[in-house]
Image (cartoon, grey):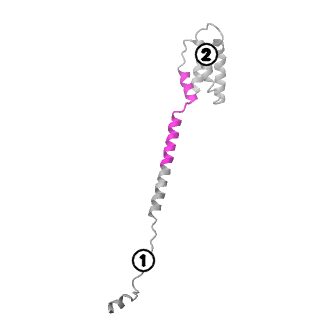
């Protein structure tokens, strides 16, 4: 009987259980979301870089075509120089002046049925204009 009475005695040195707040699941979800957003951003930037890398650049293509013009047919070369050179005429005042000088020299090769090869003065203006271009 005495044992039963001892069990009813309240002990003062033992405290009740307390609730512990556990936030590790929320931290894991937050870090996972942050990593996902960073990877999504990196993949987007990579996609834009690849897309812009393959993008058609008119200036680069016209510069390549301008340097591959065949001068054995001066009439066609005059038309090609006029067309491809127009891309670069607005770069600066010097480019515009050189383009206009080149056009003056090319006029005599455009509208005739049979034309001779480019003379030295015309070649000089063509090469001067082509050397001024920077892409």
Identify which residue, 61 or 107, lies in the foreground.
Answer: 61
Count of residue discs: 2
Q: Is residue 65 left or right of residue 17?
A: right
Where residue 88 appears, as percent x and y from the top left, is 61, 27
Mark 2 crowdedness (10 Å alpha carbons): few <14, some 14-19, many ≥20: many
Numbered badge on residue 78 = 2
Q: Quadrant of residue 118?
A: top right
Part of the protein shown in magenta: 39-67
Task: In the rendered view, tell whether residue 133 sits above or below residue 9.
Answer: above
Where residue 108 appears, as percent x and y from the top left, is 65, 12
Is residue 99 in sight in this rendering?
Answer: yes
Distance between the alpha carbons at the discs numbered 2 and 1: 95 Å
Identify which residue, 3 or 27, lies in the foreground.
Answer: 3
In the rendered view of the protein, which quadrant contains the C terminus?
A: top right
Q: Which residue is rendered at x = 49% and y = 54% of the image?
A: 34
Mark 1 crowdedness (10 Å alpha carbons): few <14, some 14-19, many ≥20: few
Q: Residue furthest bottom?
A: 2
Of badges 2 and 1, the one in the foreground is 1
Q: Which residue is rendered at x = 46% and y = 65% of the image?
A: 23
Where residue 47 appears, as percent x and y from the top left, is 50, 40
Q: Is residue 38 left or right of residue 81?
A: left
63 magenta-colored: yes
Q: Which residue is rendered at x = 42% and y = 77% of the image?
A: 17
Q: Which one is earlier in the sequence, the residue at label 2 or at label 1?
A: 1
118 magenta-colored: no
Q: Which residue is rendered at x = 55% and y = 14% of the image?
A: 71
Residue assigned mark 1: 17
């Amino acid at each position: 009987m005495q044992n039963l009475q001892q069990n009813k005695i309240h002990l003062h040195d033992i405290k009740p259980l307390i609730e512990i707040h556990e936030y590790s699941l929320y931290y894991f979800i937050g870090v996972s979301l942050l990593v996902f957003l960073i990877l999504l951003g990196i993949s987007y930037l990579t996609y834009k870089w690849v897309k812009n890398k393959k993008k058609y650049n008119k200036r680069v293509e016209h510069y390549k075509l301008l340097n591959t013009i065949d001068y054995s047919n001066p009439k066609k070369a005059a038309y090609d120089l006029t067309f491809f050179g127009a891309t670069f005429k607005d770069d600066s005042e010097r480019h515009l002046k050189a383009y206009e000088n080149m056009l003056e020299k090319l006029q005599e090769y455009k509208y005739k049925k049979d034309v001779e090869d480019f003379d030295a003065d015309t070649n000089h203006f063509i090469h001067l204009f082509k050397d001024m271009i920077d892409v």
